[in-house]
Image (cartoon, grey):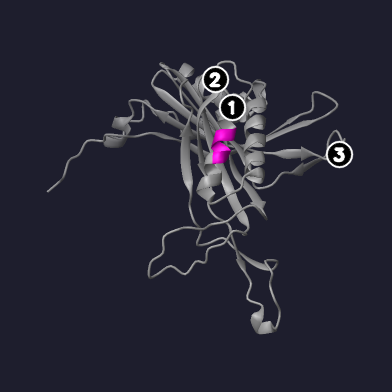
Amino acid sequence: MKYQGQIVDHRYGKAGVRLLRLDRSAATHRLFEATVQISLEGPFSEAYSAGDNRRVLPTDTMKNTVYALARRHEFDTPESLARLLARHFVGTQEQVEKASVDVAEKPWLRHADRSAAFIAGGEERFTTTVVASAEGESVSSGIDGLVILKSSRSGFEGFPRDEFTLLKETDDRILATRLEARWDYADAANVDFAAARGRIQTAMLDAFADHDSRSVQHTLYEMAEAALAAASEIERIFLRMPNKHYLLARLEPLGLDNPNCIFVPTDEPAGMIEGTVERVSA
């Protein structure tokens, strides 16, 4: 017996499109490197159910579009590139009802005052998602992969215990995480995205450093509050902060003490802490 069904949700696109744009128009060169993902939605169900490709723009075309528009147009942030692409697909392909474009920028740092020498940044990426349709456009931005650590003003005490609890309470521990943050703009029409990102990142890092942390959850909320205070353009922010554990090394068998100075770094298993904080209307 042949079972029949109806497709109720679908989209398709191109992922992992890597781009490096080198601007030599001035004496001081500029680099922009990013990875792009494109997702299109529209009346494509017959491509799935009947193999009808008349409305299916090839994903290879999407890849080529990234390079062509990067050559034709000026942009200097992941948001401006994502907007350029999302608007293009909605504006030039009548069958496309919604285009979602994700851009993750890899930062490069200029070496001293050299005009054409760069050093790759750390693991962090500057991210954005732009969704364009006939109804309008939304922009969310963020930071992913920013590894941060503080060696004081962090503890974890007062938690419930049961028969399987081995963790000791402490008021002095290393707090480290690989931060992922994503924020939504209330109105992205006239936002200086680079300036807003800079204010948000600085505010979060200052809060992380200065906060007397009773838990990762406690510090997450403090960082989110700082971000909302620093950028009136955003209406909510999501943070994911997995624990990067540094376990105290056992030196007693070697006849040595260990006054919180020798640790074993571990990545897994890791605590996973995340939360979204929204601005409260006045």
Residue 54: image location, x then y, percent: 36, 26
Give 2 or 242, whichever is nearer the viewer: 242
Note whether residue 19 is visible. no
Which residue position holds label 1?
A: 79
Q: Which region is colored magenta?
A: 222-226
Could you tell me how far apart the alpha carbons at marks 1 and 3 are, in whole angstroms? 27 Å
Write the residue at 60% across / 26% down: 231
Amino acid, disc 3:
Ala
Furthest residue toward left: 1
Relative to the observer, which residue lies in front, 20 or 64? 20
Secondary structure beneath dot 3 equals: loop
Q: Which residue is mark 3?
A: 112
Task: Check disc 2 and report the residue beneath it.
Answer: 188
- Residue at the image position 32 percent from the left and 33 percent from the top: 47
Q: CA distance from mark 2 to mark 3?
A: 33 Å
Question: In this rendering, would 160 be left or right of 37?
Answer: left
In terms of image quadrants, where is residue 111?
Answer: top right
Helix, strand or loop for disc 2: loop
Q: Amino acid at mark 1?
A: Glu
